[in-house]
Image (cartoon, rainbow, N blue to C red):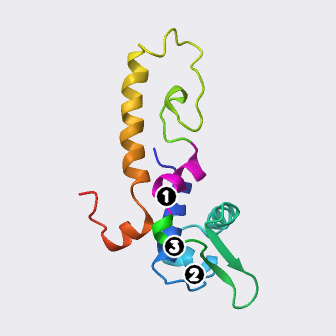
Amino acid sequence: MLSKKAKYALKALLFLAKQERKLFMISEIADHEKIPQKFLESIMLELKNNQLLFSVRGKNGGYKLAKEPVEISVGNVIRMIDGPLAQIPCVSKLYYQKCDECIDEVTCEIRLVMKKVRDATAEILDGTNLEMLILKPDILI
């Protein structure tokens, strides 16, 4: 399940992507997107630390995207905030861990079906960037 933190991160990034590189204060983004400001502050700092946002301090400061919307995939944002897309660790590409109780990964039925789920999820989320969501919000329909 997508966490509120990841959902709010995506909402904030989409808001900024629609603004054509203008600077916005956290309070403006929080008000417009109905996100608790204190929660958004920590999210924005995390996105900045991961080079997705650029910030300017001071009276006329704020946040804007550090990359083009086409360069920011939904999958990468979710991984950045929530961690792996995989439902179980033995099918994760980036965060693989062998399951303690697994006898044979090659024939494990649960692993095989969860790998299909991971692959389908990654294909959709990694294949969708902010620009696509802005220009063609019905792209997944």
Examine the rendered structure and indicate whether residue 20 appears above or below residue 124: below
Please, which residue is most extreme toward the right here? 58
Q: Residues within 10 Å of mark 1 (few under 14, many from 20)?
A: some
Magenta portion: prevailing SS class: helix
Q: Position of residue 107 (x, y in %)?
A: 41, 13
Is 77 covered by the magenta stretch? yes
| Marker disc for residue 7 | 1
Residue 98 occupies quadrant:
top right
Along the horizontal axis of the image, is 42 left or right of 28?
right
What residue appears at the point 47 percent right and 59 percent down from the top-left corner? Answer: 73
Q: Which residue is mark 3?
A: 68
User: Which label sits in the foreground, 3 or 1?
Assistant: 3
- The region drawn magenta spans 72-83
Earlier in the chain: of badge 1 and badge 2, it is 1
Residue type, numbered disc 2: Glu
Secondary structure of residue under mark 2: helix
Tell me whether the residue at label 3 lies in contact with that at label 1, contact meaning CB atoms closer than 8 angstroms: no
Secondary structure of residue under mark 1: helix
Q: Which residue is mark 2?
A: 28
Given residues 23 and 51, the one toward you in this image is: 51
What residue appears at the point 52 percent right and 69 percent down from the top-left corner? Answer: 13
What residue appears at the point 68 percent right and 62 percent down from the top-left corner? Answer: 42
